[in-house]
Image (cartoon, rainbow, N blue to C red):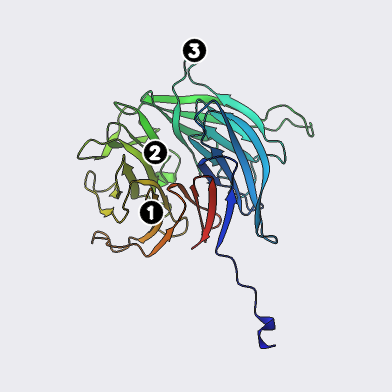
Amino acid sequence: MAGLNVAPKRKEIYKYEAPWTLYSMNWSVRPDKRFRLAIGSFVEEYNNKVQVISLDEDSAEFSAKSTFDHPYPTTKIMWIPDAKGVFPDLLATSGDYLRIWKAGEPDTRLECLLNNNKNSDFCAPLTSFDWNEVEPNLIGTSSIDTTCTIWGLETGQVVGRVGGTGNCVSGHVKTQLIAHDKEVYDIAFSRAGGGRDMFASVGADGSVRMFDLRHLEHSTIIYEDPQHRPLLRLAWNRQDPSYLATISMDACEVVILDVRVPCTPVARLSNHRACVNGIAWAPHSSCHICTAGDDHQALIWDIQQMPRAIEDPILAYTAAEGEINQIQWGATQPDWIAICYNRSLEILRV
């Protein structure tokens, strides 16, 4: 009888099986929507899907709350970074264009499609985007046409109309700049200097470049890959804006950079045995980062002893069934990391 008052052991892993191969994925940050994520299909044709899923903590099961069509696979999905829940419940997707959606159950509605190339029949696909945390009316996109575009959003509910069907979001181009010599693959706003104006991008020319919206006439090259391999992703440390991480194409290592010491990596994380696909800094700690790759592994690293070499990760998780192609560390749930492989999404307690 002594064991009756023992609390049930908390689950460490929850899994969701989607109807299609997964690529993009993002945690919702609203305080009233714990364990809600958006996931995007990767189907090599026009018709793709986005799904909003939520974990029922009582039944310990994920369920789909909303599923909607998306042209082409989403290259990125992101919920509005609105931790207080004061803005409309929006999410954005990139692919052929940038789209802003109003989340609903069961119907998620397209609010606006942002197209910067009105005078052409062709669009230059977007590789990524970032939603500014300090100023949620700013979104920056990166494109294969060598440019980055900063969009200004207006989110206004029409006064006096309850439950109206009119769209409450519109957008305009604040600035567009040629950011790289070749395709741009990722963009991310920095928290430095107030968190509104600074952003960095990476691209096929193998460079990391930093920009300031107040002085767009010049940029700073923070790093260039020695072999001029394309750089695919970058991620800023969420507690210390001096540090960022990047990965190059087909590389088994993650490069950590310090913007105060340009061009020289301050650390290399190189325990993966196949190419790295994703990087995610801890939301609550400046010295922890998670990396994931084709070796089925998600690794968590403690980097506080930089610039001394970081030999080994402190935690490792293996997804037995597949190559991990996406990793996200929840901003409002720092105890949980989400990964995607094949058709599966798993959230892991860390």
Q: Quadrant of the N terminus?
A: bottom right
Q: Is residue 226 above or below residue 346?
A: above
- Pointer 1 local density, CA inside 10 Å: few below 14, some 14–19, many at least 20: some
Q: Residue furthest left?
A: 226
Query: Callout 1, which amino acid?
Result: Asp
Q: Secondary structure at mark 2?
A: strand
Q: Position of residue 127 (x, y in %)?
A: 43, 32
Residue name at image x 38 percent, y 48 percent: 294
Q: Nearer the viewer, residue 318 or 287?
A: 318
Query: Callout 2, which amino acid?
Result: Phe
Q: Is residue 155 above or below residue 4?
A: above
Alpha-carbon span between mark 1 and mark 2: 14 Å
Q: Position of residue 243 (x, y in %)?
A: 34, 50
* Residue linked to disc 2: 199
* Residue linked to disc 1: 240
Marks 1 and 2 close (CB-CB < 8 Å): no
Q: Nearer the viewer, residue 21 or 206?
A: 21
241 to the left or right of 328: left
Marks 2 and 3 close (CB-CB < 8 Å): no
Q: Nearer the viewer, residue 215 or 18?
A: 18
Q: Is residue 291 above or below residue 137?
A: below
Instruction: State which tag comes first along the sequence, 1 or 2.
Output: 2
Q: Position of residue 140 (x, y in %)?
A: 46, 33
Alpha-carbon span between mark 2 and mark 3: 30 Å
**Res. 121 mark:** 3
Q: Nearer the viewer, mark 3 or mark 1?
A: 3
Residue 92 seen in render: yes
